[in-house]
Image: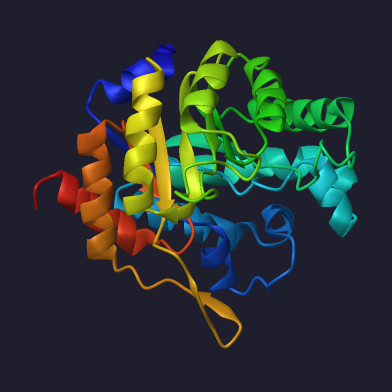
Amino acid sequence: MHPVIETILSGGPAVTDGAWGTQLQSRGLKIGACPDAWNIAEPGRVEEVARSYVEAGSQIILTNTFGANRIVLSGHGLESQAAEINRRGVEISRRAAGERARVFASIGPTGKMLLMGEVTEDDLREAFREQAQALAQAGPDAIVIETMSDLAEAKIALDAALETGLAVVACMVFDSGSRKDRTLMGVTPEQAAAELTSAGAHVIGANCGQGVEGYLPVCRRLLDSTSLPIWVKANAGLPELVDGKAVYRTTPEEFARGAAALVEAGARFVGGCCGTGPEFIRALKEALSGG
């Protein structure tokens, strides 16, 4: 086990943070705008989000760099600022975390499909290497590769992140198939666990796509397929479309009970994804402490 991961888990299961996108939107980010660009344009508002999770009790917070690879940024004309956006993302979360939380830098997918020939493996390798190196230069505690549906893309991102020498978490989205237990590309928890473990990840897991209840069996299957710690960040249930906006009905208390069940099932890192906020993390901390 990587020393950073071992140190964190020596105190028991760790609580991570919740969603970032909706929190930024509540502070004025327009739908369709580039969230990562706010690391330069609105660093104070980004820090508000990070700090809100620290104050809610998150032991690990992520960075506002989910889409800060040059392939995604090129859609906003910002690819030349990729390195700066990533460095600033880590610096912002570092300020918010202080001595109270660890910072795990976020790397998300490119949104392009290898299978369809939209990008090549070399394109992905170059983009993820640039992002990972920029993140590492700013001094995070670890890197999180998250919301991946293509195992090939996840492994390329993992290779790039491992080059930094930092601990790396690798997460897939399991939200497809008749039982919602496969990725969009048909990858099972067992396949993901085996390949990501073999590829050198220090932690593996699942995030986004569905709520806590759906991730309970996925968590157990991941746990049965690897000796690595398991990370799960579930959504606040499945969204409903109301007036063109996604509305999540799960309450913080319901989410907290479900996330506590994930810990009982073997997850060592738990937090929230879409539809969650600081109030969800606060409720989760209370549930885990027996409050």
Examine the rendered structure and indicate whether residue 189 appears above or below residue 214: above
Q: Which residue is painted at 47% across and 39% down in the image?
A: 206
Q: Position of residue 202 (x, y in %)?
A: 48, 18
251 horizontally vs 274: left or right = left
Name the residue located 40 percent from the left edge and 34 percent from the top edge: 231
Q: Quadrant of residue 2?
A: top left
Between 66 and 179, the residue placed more toward the observer is: 179
Please state the horizontal and vertical placement of residue 167, each as a whole percent of the image. 52, 20
* 129 up-or-down from 51: above or below: above
At x 40%, y 28%, the residue is 222
Let me know if residue 201 appears in the view.
no
For residue 77, side relative to residue 146 (left or right): right
Picture coordinates of residue 97, whole percent (x, y): 43, 42
Judging from the image, the colouring scheme is rainbow
Residue under the point 76% across and 43% down? 110
Task: Give the side of residue 156 with respect to residue 91, left or right.
Answer: right
* Residue 289 percent coordinates (x, y): 13, 44
Position of 94 relative to 11 (above/below): below
| 255 over 265 or under it: above or below | below
User: In the depicted view, which residue is nearer to us: 14 or 240?
Assistant: 240
Can residue 177 be seen in this snapshot?
yes
